[in-house]
Image (cartoon, helix red, strand yellow):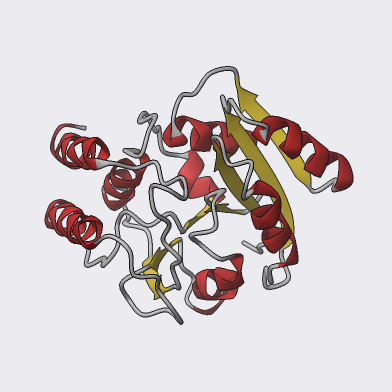
Amino acid sequence: MSLEILSILIPCYNEERTLADIVTRVQNADSCGLKKEIIIIDDGSTDGSLKLAKRIAEADACVRIFFHPQNMGKGAAIRTGIQESKGDLILVQDADLEYDPKEYPRLLAPFFDSQADVVYGSRFKGGESTRAVYFWHSVGNHLLTLLSNMMTDLNLTDMETCYKVFRASLLRSIILRENRFGFEPEVTAKISRLSPRPVIYEVGISYMGRTYEDGKKIGWKDGVSAIYCIVRYNLFS
């Protein structure tokens, strides 16, 4: 099946400081000849994110806006984006500046070169640069990936990465339930259980991690939740 449209989902919760910058980077990114559909899902922001998103959409017909009246979580925002998307590929892009859209050609290449169904962008596989921030976050990510791999029999290096790209038909065939950051282990588990198993690739990406002072939201409770999701969706789903 030919690929024509790339749907880029941008879940957003109180990211007024970075939203315009990341959308500009997405607009200017190389999408390997695919037409871009940019979907911003405001997840009950209490700052000026939604007003800013509406101004961005007014200036670019390729940008569409959806919003939740109250905060529901990243997973819920992604579900809304999946439902509203029209593309052949779906890419998840955080609204902060940790992940740079200049990596899109790396993420998209396996779909053209190797008939990939899913591509993960790994922060630990070797990108151009990685900001040094939290050691224990890195340890936690490695442990969660290890536990997930033991359950799924995949050899990923970064299950928790934001940068995931899916063939849209495959992603739409999965029922997703997690509202917060449990999206990452849930979607990984459910993809690994499909038959026949999708063709999954992993590519190295750069990563400019931010601090809590910069607005980072994920915490240790989300790590505990991720363990629960890994067990639940691999053993009891």
The image position of residue 48, as x and y in percent, is 68, 32
> In the figure, 87 relative to 55: above or below?
below
| Residue plotted at (31% across, 57% down) | 197
Q: In the shown orientation, is residue 15 left or right of residue 164?
A: right
On-image quarter of the N terminus: bottom right
Q: In the shown orientation, is residue 53 left or right of residue 9?
A: right
Q: In the shown orientation, is residue 68 left or right of residue 34?
A: left
| Residue plotted at (14% across, 51% down) | 151
The image position of residue 125, as x and y in percent, is 32, 76
Q: Which residue is situated farthest in the front direction here? A: 213
Q: How many marks?
A: 0
> In the figure, 81 relative to 18: above or below?
above
Of 165 and 132, the residue lying toward us: 132
> In the figure, 220 relative to 48: above or below?
below
Q: Is residue 85 visible?
A: no
On-image quarter of the C terminus: top left
Of 112 and 72, the residue lying toward us: 72
The image position of residue 31, as x and y in percent, is 67, 68
| Residue plotted at (13% across, 38% down) | 235
| Residue plotted at (59% across, 74% down) | 105
The image position of residue 183, as x and y in percent, is 36, 40
- Rendering quarter of residue 154: bottom left
